[in-house]
Amino acid sequence: MSNPTKPINVVVTGAAGQIAYSLLYQLAAGTVFGPDQPINLHLLDIPVMMKVLEGVVMELEDLALPLLREIVPTADPAVAFKDVAAAFLVGAMPRKEGMERKDLLAANVEIFKVQGEALDKYARKDVKILVVGNPANTNALICSHYAPSIPKQNFSAMTRLDQNRAQAALAARLNVQVDQVKKVVIWGNHSSTQYPDAAHATVTLQGSTKSVPAALNQDNWLQTTFVETIQKRGAAVIAARKMSSAMSAAKAAGDHMRDWWMGTKPGEYVSMAVFSDGSYGIPENIVFSFPVTIEPRGQYKIVQGLPISEFARSKLTVTANELEEERTEAYKVLQKK
Ligand code: NAD
Ligand code: LMR
């Protein structure tokens, strides 16, 4: 356990970009690592973005927040990853309208090789790594491959935005506040094959808690419109904004790391893309989104024993297959370089 008065080093890559712009405030304000944990922010971007990054640094200074100690803007991974306890790997090209996230593999996978090597050399061995840059699951796999001295369990990719989207969509359908819906699960890839699963979700209505499928009594909607809406939500935001989601992605990144750092609430679970250990029959050596619970300052544990219907099984197979294909493609790209 770290000494709460000693600052921890936290790196954010893509620090001059859109998501970082919303994420950095949360980190500096203490909503992720807690109100007693000072932090040094290491901000990595590419050389042409250093001028923009200077402006971000000025704004961080002007926040006048006491938990924020040193700010280290840099284009050098050796400096950025030095002794970091937490890493937000955001820096990567975002997709444009008409692209699938896996179309970014060729452009982005090399970044995660380089950053994996830098994590291996310079980061703390207990560093918690969250990959946000797309295709996030496969980038996390590649990053870990090039950081063999860091345990695989320390790598994760973000499906929390999908979880938040699913929770919000269910709450709207049930006409309740979003925090009354719990235990919705995102399985698989952060892509259009993900399976948002409300079968185990609960809702609290007028003080009594029941299962979401029972409360809705509409399995058809849960298996069709709900699933498709969440799978395509990222594309819908791009179509409207002409840029990919940023505010909601930053919030989800903060949620993911806060729960990993501080632990999940008793009786609840959250979705994180982590190395498959074969749970639920998912092949190993892919980074797959599972429901997890986390002890404060502890490791995540994949929730075991959730019943998987035939419908759910078919969805899990599709998304696992896609991750295996992405893995093959990523190693092909890296071999060509
Ligand atoms: P952006 O283009 O606004 O910012 C990306 C930043 O990364 C830029 O400043 C760029 O210069 C920097 N960068 C590029 N290569 C880098 C490198 N090698 N090292 C350090 N920095 C580098 O993009 P954004 O909107 O912030 O999105 C970032 C990534 O996050 C994209 O890949 C996007 O698709 C992804 N994303 C993921 C989720 C998710 O739920 N997992 C959600 C939203 C966006
Ligand atoms: C999202 O889900 O909003 C992001 O992954 C961006 C995208 O490409 O969809």
Image (tube, rainbow, N blue to C red):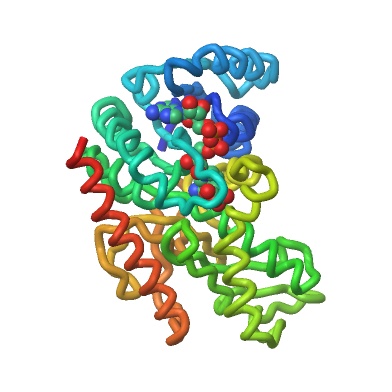
Q: What is the x, y in percent for residue 248?
A: 64, 46
Q: Can residue 262 be seen by looking at this rendering? A: no
Q: What is the x, y in percent for residue 263?
A: 51, 52
Q: Is residue 237 above or below residue 173?
A: above
Residue 319 lies in quadrant:
bottom left
Q: Could you tell whether 316 is left or right of 71 in the image?
A: left
Q: What is the x, y in percent for residue 206?
A: 81, 76
Which quarter of the figure is the N terminus placed in? top left
Q: Is residue 217 above or below residue 205?
A: below
What residue appears at the point 65 percent right and 64 percent down from the top-left corner?
A: 167
Q: Is residue 66 above or below residue 283?
A: above
Q: Could you tell whether 211 is left or right of 45 in the image?
A: right
Give the camera-side residue of 6 and 51: 51
Q: What is the x, y in percent for residue 71?
A: 52, 16
How many badges with numbers are in the image? 0
Q: Is residue 288 above or below residue 5?
A: below
What residue appears at the point 28 percent right and 61 percent down from the top-left corner?
A: 324
Q: Can residue 323 be seen by looking at this rendering? A: yes
What residue appears at the point 28 percent right and 64 percent down from the top-left corner?
A: 277
Give the camera-side residue of 181 and 136: 136
Give the camera-side residue of 201 and 166: 166
Residue 325 lies in quadrant:
bottom left
Which quarter of the figure is the C terminus placed in? top left
What residue appears at the point 42 percent right and 60 percent down from the top-left corner?
A: 189
- Work out which residue is located at the far front of the displayed protein and give it: 98
